[in-house]
């Protein structure tokens, strides 16, 4: 039942991992920019590291987790997965094309301040549904919480770096999807989000 490398969910994790690895290899300057934790507090750094590592155990676990025999869940999961992968690729395209020291604000970044994270979450939700695996779903819930706090730290730094430009962006673009957030990130010392 739980045989590694069989017809398991790693078939879905692998393309996500390969696209991410190719992006990181081709665009080291952008990867460095995205992983810069200058100005983060010790707690923000800890959460950011944990959130950045969180997808890998999930993907490793998919080596042993088979797809569900329930056709409706499998189809729903594969549909979500395809939507997430599309959003992931579109978000990476914007990141690649945006000049250094400019905000990511075109393409999917017009509808979400964090489409890359939204895409990854949708991809992993698709895998959870395609496998009907409650353990993966629980792990994903924890990873999403860590990711949220990492995003708060990133947005605080963006507010300090880009000021009014980022403030305007946060007012017209939701943090995740569809619903505009009531709280806006503030610069350090302004009562903004903190961990």
Image (cartoon, rainbow, N blue to C red):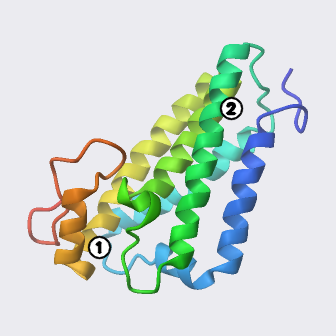
In the displayed structure, does residue 103 sit left or right of residue 74? left
Mark 2 lies on a secondary structure that is helix
Q: Quadrant of the C terminus?
A: bottom left
Q: Mark 2 Cα within 10 Å, few/some/many (few <14, many 20+)?
A: many
> Residue shown at 29%/65% (left/top)?
155
Q: Nearer the viewer, mark 2 or mark 1?
A: 2
In the displayed structure, does residue 76 sit left or right of residue 192? right
Residue 4 position within the rendered picture, expressed as x and y whole percent measured from the top left? 88, 36
Marker disc for residue 158: 1
Marker disc for residue 101: none
In the image, residue 64 sits, relative to residue 100, either above or below, namely above
**Res 22 → quadrant:** bottom right
* Dots 2, 1 in contact, CB < 8 A: no
Q: Is residue 108 visible?
A: yes
Q: CA distance from mark 2 to mark 1?
A: 34 Å
Q: Quadrant of the N terminus?
A: top right
> Residue shown at 36%/75% (left/top)?
103
Residue 69 position within the rendered picture, expressed as x and y whole percent measured from the top left? 78, 15
Marker disc for residue 78: 2
- Which residue occupies the extreme left position in the image? 190
> Residue shown at 29%/73% (left/top)?
158
**Res 26 → quadrant:** bottom right
């Amino acid at each position: 039942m739980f045989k590694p490398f069989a017809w398991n969910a790693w078939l879905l994790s692998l393309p996500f991992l390969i696209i991410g690895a190719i992006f990181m290899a081709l665009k080291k300057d952008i990867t460095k920019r995205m992983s810069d934790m200058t100005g983060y507090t010790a707690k923000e750094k800890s959460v950011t590291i944990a959130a950045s590592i969180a997808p890998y155990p999930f993907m490793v676990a998919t080596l042993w987790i088979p797809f569900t025999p329930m056709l409706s869940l499998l189809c729903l999961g594969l549909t979500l997965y395809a939507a997430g992968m599309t959003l992931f690729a579109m978000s990476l395209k914007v990141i690649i094309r945006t000049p250094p020291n400019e905000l990511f604000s075109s393409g999917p970044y017009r509808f979400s301040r964090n489409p890359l994270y939204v895409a990854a979450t949708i991809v992993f939700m698709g895998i959870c549904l395609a496998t009907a695996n409650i353990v993966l779903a629980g792990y994903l819930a924890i990873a999403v919480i860590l990711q949220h706090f990492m995003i708060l730290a990133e947005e605080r730094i963006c507010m300090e770096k880009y000021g009014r430009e980022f403030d305007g962006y946060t007012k017209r673009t939701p943090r995740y999807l569809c619903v505009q957030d009531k709280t806006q990130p503030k610069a350090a010392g302004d009562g903004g989000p903190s961990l």
